[in-house]
Image (cartoon, helix red, strand yellow):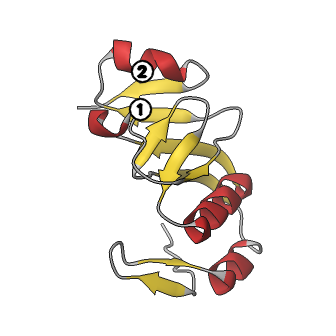
Amino acid sequence: MELIVLGGTVRPISMGTTGALAEQALRHMHADRLFTSGDGLLPGEGLCEATLEQVSLKSLMMRQARAVFVLADASKLGQDTQPFRAPLPPRWVLVTDAPPAACAAFGEAEVIRAG
């Protein structure tokens, strides 16, 4: 496995990078699989994020990956916790510990139950 860290501005709360430098580097990369998450996950809207920079980078990451896996525990499903949205691709996988009834709203996703 190889780990590549993008440049950009570091968000102290998450220690993740965002911004033009991160996006520029990411445009030159492709991934077989993207494992990502958000502060919340809304059916038909996507991942909830705190900033437009996060949405922009996450959207680009999803376009650069062949498969997108969203890691979201039960507490994140249906949570409208942030003002910005990163839409999900037509095909994606939800990895969660939530019961099947909570996952039903995400009918477009393949669901993998964890935990």
Secondary structure category for the residue under label 2: helix
Question: Which of pointers 1 and 2 lies earlier in the amino acid sequence?
Answer: 1
- For residue 58, above or below residue 53: above
Q: Quadrant of residue 88?
A: top right
Which residue is outermost to the left?
115
State the image coordinates of residue 1 (x, y, percent, origin top left): 48, 66
- For residue 71, above or below residue 49: above
Q: Which residue does the numbered mark 1 point to in the structure image?
A: 78
- For residue 51, above or below residue 11: above
Within 10 Å of the Cα at label 2, are there few (<14), some (14-19), or many (20+) other Cα atoms?
Answer: many
Amino acid on which disc 1 is placed: Gly
Q: Which residue does the numbered mark 2 point to in the structure image?
A: 103
State the image coordinates of residue 52 (x, y, percent, origin top left): 60, 66
The C terminus sits in image quarter: top left
Residue at 35 percent of width and 72 percent of height: 14
Answer whether labels 1 and 2 touch (C-beta < 8 Å).
Answer: no
Residue at 49 percent of width and 19 percent of height: 105
State the image coordinates of residue 112 (x, y, percent, origin top left): 42, 27
Secondary structure category for the residue under label 1: loop
Amino acid on which disc 2 is placed: Cys
Residue at 57 percent of width and 87 percent of height: 7
Horizontal placement of 115 versus 48: left or right?
Answer: left
Within 10 Å of the Cα at label 1, are there few (<14), some (14-19), or many (20+) other Cα atoms?
Answer: some
Horizontal placement of 54 versus 113: left or right?
Answer: right
Horizontal placement of 73 versus 82: left or right?
Answer: left
State the image coordinates of residue 66 (x, y, percent, origin top left): 70, 47
Foreground disc of the pair 1, 2: 1
Between residue 38 and residue 51, name the one nearer to us: 51
Which residue is outermost to the right?
28
